Amino acid sequence: MSTAEIGGVLATIGGTPLVALDRIGKGLRVFAKMEKFNPGGSVKDRTALHMLQGALRAGTLVPGRSVVVESTSGNLGVGLAQLCAYFGLDLVCVVDTRTTAQTIALLRAYGATVELVTEPVDGDLLGARIARVRELLARLPDAFWPDQYANPLNPAAHEQTMREIAEALDGRVDYLFCSVSTGGTMRGCADYIRRHGLTTELVAVDAAGSAIFHVPTEGRLLPGHGAGRRPPLVDTSAVREVVHVTDLECVRACRELVACEAILAGGSSGATVAALGKLRDRIPAGSVCVLVFPDDGNRYLDTIYSDHWVREHFGELPAPASRALAALP
């Protein structure tokens, strides 16, 4: 096996299950693409593998010599850290203050070096992360930046994600709900939809505090959902509709997923559930709706699932489970 080929634990990336969400369906056929079952715990494992494998095959990365440097809010960093450990590559992850303590601990457990930025540059923390990446690229010999925000191998990885969804449902996917950060998952799915002539309507789910599709209406606390600027990979022409979701709506939807479906999901997963709630009255009965769940909730135990954190930031707790999804917008 050459260095660029995959084996071992990396061979388990992809092929994640599609789970029926019967209890929140309410007249719709709702499914969740459960990306937490990738070995690094998120959809970003697909992105990390595609970008690094491409660079290894091209000779841009050389195990034992090259240093991978990337900006990340968390999940891509974990995916990269796992791959770099496997391929024998050094990794520096540039994170910011939204990155959870558990994610930072995971990065270090895999052997990555963590660089934390705390002050915005050009108005946002993403700008600060990218500025720090550029500094490191100039200082470190044999440094390589995968650049998840502009690398075409990012969306290319997610054509397979959409292929898995379409094949599992015999090509019938009426609505696909994707939360947006780099735009890679959304664009890759859109490329597959176009190429195969599917009639799927793509719903982009963005944070109310994100600048991807509008001027932010509030601050943004949760990592991995939204961005301080529009990444180059975001393809607005592919989007049927954009739904903006607040952090509190994400928290509420995540907790209701636990109560109704026994699924502990991350903030961007909860965002897709909240977005479905906002559009539910306009979606024809019997429609097949797929929600991409990017990661698991275990990285959010100190935030979304912490009563103390929720009260501190929002002054209230979500409605009790007995009121279930009726509490959603």
Image: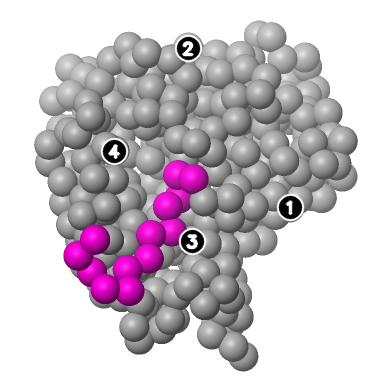
Q: Nearer the viewer, residue 264 or 290?
A: 290
Q: Secondary structure at mark 3?
A: helix
Q: Nearer the viewer, mark 3 or mark 1?
A: 3
Question: Residue 167's x, y, as percent?
Answer: 82, 50
Question: Residue 296's x, y, as percent?
Answer: 43, 49
Badge 4 or badge 3: first in the primary sequence? 3
Badge 1 or badge 4: first in the primary sequence? 4
- Cα separation, mark 1 vs mark 4, equals 31 Å
Residue 34 forms part of the magenta stretch: no
- Cα separation, mark 1 vs mark 2, equals 30 Å
Q: Amino acid at mark 2?
A: Pro
Residue carrying label 4: 126
Residue 142 forms part of the magenta stretch: yes
Image mark for residue 164 = 1
Residue interval drawn in magenta:
138-150
Q: Nearer the viewer, residue 109 or 88?
A: 88
Residue carrying label 2: 329
Q: Amino acid at mark 3?
A: Ala
Residue carrying label 3: 48
